[in-house]
Image (tube, rainbow, N blue to C red):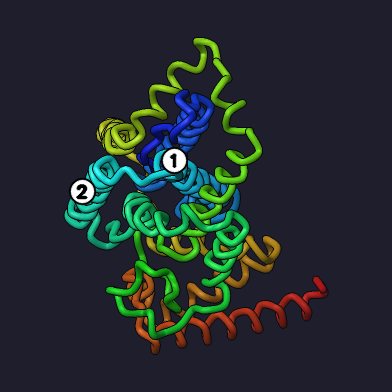
Amino acid sequence: MSIHTPTAPVQDRPNRIVAIDIVRGIALIAMASYHFTWDLEFFGYTDPGLTAFGWWKIYARCIASTFLFLVGVSLYLAHGRQIRWNGFWRRFAMVAGAAIAISVVTRIATPDGFIFFGILHEIALASLLGLAFLRLPALLTLLVAALVIAAPVYLRLEAFDHPWLWWIGLSAINPRSNDYVPLFPWFGAVLAGIAVTKLASASGLLARLAELAPGRWANPLVFIGRHSLAFYLIHQPLLIGSVWLFAQVMPAKVETPQVNFLKTCQLSCEQSRDTEFCSSYCVCMLDTLESEASLDRLYNNDQTAEWKTHISDLAGMCTAKTEDKMTEGGVK
């Protein structure tokens, strides 16, 4: 996850706002920490599903939201008074080119979860669409942002299930990808950044922020924040390469698919139910899938309507069995 958008000042405000670079730098460090944990999970050093649920999932969403909010901030700072088309298209080409390169590389390296529309794809598209909101009233932009964020909750439709439409973010299925940041709801964070920056400019807050002069402690963060695209493109290959080298010396213990399923199922289930229920429920699901010889089909991320209905039915059956078992055992 990264952000690389114009931060050149608007007219009548010549000072670069260093505080924004610092916030971006902090977010980049946070992103690297999340990616390092993901790398450890990928190589089997942590339980499967660790970064997909609970606090790690919230952590990842906070990081992505911060970057996309800053896209809106930077877009307004650079083009709020007048769109500088040469600068815009140059930076757009850099981000879009990097996004395409990541899609190509991940398609080769991890075809089952390749990044077809990740954070850079979203930044490129959101930067282009965001231009239409630079002159609109801030409150109207905030209203649209709220609608964009809420849309996936109420407007998921099977009509958007075709892979060519997954970038929109309104499909009834959740596509498998190592970095999936579709237009809805994430464009809402960009719009919020535009609106908040416009309000901050009108109130004089931007001028006060521009006068801040942090000490030397902030220099590394400022440097990273001003070279965010380079940081994004370099950090993950370095991190995952380091973990790979370590794995050649001290490889992680290889778990069976059954053990991995139980761990992932338990972690997912405990987001809404207690541990005892989840333990029994997950065993029921595993036993049923194994009796059908369909565990591999689950791991292959089958997205057919028939399979999704079947899994839903199995989940309902195991939920009912587990609740009956717990009731009979006097747990309730």
Image spot of residue 43 (x, y percent): 34, 44
Residue 275 is left or right of residue 98, and the answer is right
Q: Which quadrant would residue 269 be assigned to in this image?
A: bottom right
- In the rendered image, which quarter contains the C terminus? bottom right
As measured in the structure, the alpha-carbon distance from the residue carrying label 2 to the one carrying label 1 is: 19 Å
User: Residue 217, position in %: x, y?
Assistant: 52, 13
Residue at 44% x, 23% y: name it: 222
Q: Which residue is mark 1?
A: 74
Q: Is 105 displayed left or right of 317 in the figure?
A: left
Q: Position of residue 35 (x, y in %)?
A: 41, 41
Q: Which mark is residue 89?
A: none
The residue that appears at 49% across and 42% down in the rendered structure is 73
**Mark 2 against mark 1, which lies toward the viewer?**
1
- Residue 276 lies, with reference to residue 64, above or below; the image says below
Identify the residue position indicated by label 2 in the image: 97
The percent position of residue 60, horizontal first and vertical second, equals 50, 48
Q: Residues within 10 Å of mark 1 (few under 14, many from 20)?
A: many
Q: Provide the secondary structure element on which disc 1 rests.
A: helix
- At label 1, the amino acid type is Ser
Q: Amino acid at mark 2?
A: Gly
Front-most of residues 48 and 169? 169
Image height of 16 relative to 142, above or below? above
Image point (27%, 62%), residue name? 112
User: Circle 2 — which element?
Assistant: helix
Q: Along the line of sight, which residue is nearer the eye, 201 or 293?
A: 201
Report the quarter where the N terminus lies: top left
Q: Nearer the viewer, residue 276 or 137?
A: 137
N-terminal-most mark, 2 or 1: 1
